Amino acid sequence: MESVKVSVLLPVYNGGSTLPQAIASILSQDMSELELIIIDDCSTDNSASIIRQYADKDSRIIPIFHEVNIGLAKTLNEGLNLAKSDFVARMDQDDESLPHRLRIQLDYMLRHPDFAVVGSYVYHMGAKQEFDRLVELPSDAEQIKQTLLQYNCMYHPSVMMRRNKILEIGGYQPEFKNAEDYDLWLRVSKSSLLANISEPLLRYRFSVSGMTLSRKWEQLFYVYLAQSAYKNETSSAEVINSKAQEMLKQIDRTYFLGEVANGTILELLKLKLWKDAICLTWNFSTDIGFKKSVRLLIHIITSSLY
């Protein structure tokens, strides 16, 4: 194997339907000095067999298979500790890295030694590539630091990180379920700089599999938990949790869920993902009500005619 300049960390759980595209996009990068650490967290589909097939053909793949499911944060920490390079790029099982992604991010990190994390603009993946939608994000360090106080402006699968900096602050924290990355960026921002390269380097799949509004509400709590931990780092876990609960109580649940439903459906329509939009509207109907679901369905049908 060539010397490893970049370690790519790809956690997998039941990703068989999209995993080949994700793996192929890394193996076809325009720089070859990489290792691809794929950790299957006890999938129940055909993910493991797909990983083995690719690993048999390319020695740059480091396959790891869990016998029990340990969750995303612990899986990512395992990968960070295994990485041979100090430059670790994240990748998700349902996305696609553009061919020049790793080269551009590595070059940025080498030229900017004060930066611990660098992400990029992304494309939301459309029904066809011509329907992809560009998502622009805050790019400079100060802008990102200020934006992170409000919301997560770093796409997790788009980032490259300095391994030593991430491990120094404790890596991913499992207690921030569904917001592990947001908590990490907030902690990174206290001692290091973050950036987003102002060009798209990743096609991000706007996945709706298993998406529910109740899960979005649960995720909002963990977002507030991360913000609370950032602002009250010397407080006990009980105090941090209590403050997050107080923040959540200030939010109108019905309004929040309605906004999430509208925003999600609108994005799917822009991407021409009609079937996903219809399925998700049905899934959301329990939370947003029958009448609102019907209005959304009418909007989907009308939009599909143009």
Image (cartoon, helix red, strand yellow):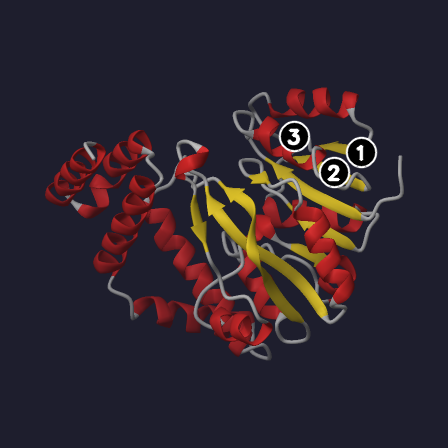
Q: Amino acid at mark 1?
A: Arg
Which residue is the site of mark 1? 60
Task: List x then y, in percent, for residue 242.
Answer: 43, 71
Give the CA separation, mark 3 to mark 2.
11 Å
Residue at figure coordinates x 68%, y 26% from the top left:
51
Task: Count neighbours of disc 1 (C-alpha within 10 A) and say few if under 14, some if 14 to 19, many if 20 or more.
Answer: many
Residue 299 image-quadrant placement: top left
Which residue is the site of mark 3? 24
In this orientation, does residue 175 appear?
A: no
User: Do the numbered discs 3 and 2 sit on residues whose CB atoms are within 8 Å?
Assistant: no
User: Do the numbered discs 1 and 2 sit on residues whose CB atoms are within 8 Å?
Assistant: yes
Q: Is residue 25 above or below residue 138?
A: above
Task: List x then y, in percent, for residue 222.
Answer: 46, 60
Image check: 244 left or right of 258? right
Q: Which mark is residue 124?
A: none
Which tag is nearer the camera, tag 1 or tag 3?
Answer: 3
Q: Quadrant of the C terminus?
A: top left
Label 2 element class = strand
Q: Is residue 50 above or below residue 13?
A: above
Label 3 element class = helix
Label 1 element class = loop
